[in-house]
Amino acid sequence: MKKYMVYMDDGRDCFKVAVPAKNEKAARDYVMGNGEVIAVKDITDEYPISLDKISDALKKAQFGQTEIDLVLRCLSFNDIAE
């Protein structure tokens, strides 16, 4: 998976949404119905996510080790975090 920033206009406001998706079309499909897509930008290299930092944050939030392992493995398996 890659990380995309989808820029949208809902008729009143412009906003952006970070979306993990397999490709640009999947990112567009994910936000469909929430406004007009103005642009989609691949941000995979711009926003690195650390598995260690996520693990620390989940521990501080008192998540159990099983839940932490599941979250970290999903993020790692989908190439969202390193």
Image (tube, rainbow, N blue to C red):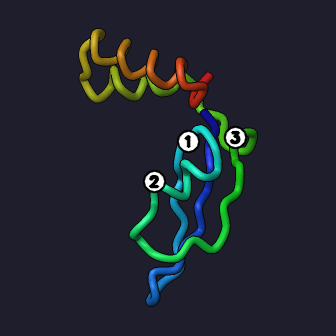
Residue projecting furthest to the right = 45
* Residue 61 picture location, percent across and down: 28, 29
Q: Residue at x 33, y 25 (%)?
A: 60
The image position of residue 37, as x and y in percent, is: 57, 71
- Give residue 44's mark: 3
Near mark 3 (Cα within 10 A), the count class, few <14, some 14-19 or many ≥20, is some
Q: Quadrant of residue 3?
A: top right
Which residue lies under the disc numbered 2?
30
Residue at the disc numbered 1: 21
Image point 28% across, 17% down: which residue? 67
Callouts 1 and 2 close, C-beta under 8 Å: yes
In the rendered view, tell whether residue 32 sits above or below residue 46: below
* The N terminus lies in quadrant: top right
The foreground one among 53 and 74 is 74
Q: Could you tell me residue 52's position as x and y percent?
A: 53, 19
Which residue corresponds to the image point at 60% horizontal and 25% vertical from the top-left? Answer: 79
The quadrant the C terminus occupies is top right
Which numbered disc covers residue 62?
none
The three-letter amino acid code for the residue at tag 2 is: Tyr
Instruction: Find the distance from the CA under tag 1 to the CA under tag 2.
Output: 8 Å
Which amino acid, by three-letter code, is at mark 1? Ala
Name the element at disc 1.
strand
Residue at 52% x, 76% y is 36
Q: Residue 12's image quarter? A: bottom left
Question: Cα distance, mark 2 to mark 3?
Answer: 17 Å
Of residues 34 and 66, the one drawn nearer to the viewer in this rendering: 34
Question: Under tag 2, what secondary structure?
Answer: helix
Say above or below: 66 vs 71.
Answer: above
Q: What amino acid is at disc 3?
A: Thr
Q: Earlier along the polypeptide chain: callout 3 or callout 1?
A: 1
Q: Judging from the image, what secondary structure is the residue with disc 3 in?
A: loop
User: Observer-nearest residue: 6 or 56?
Assistant: 6
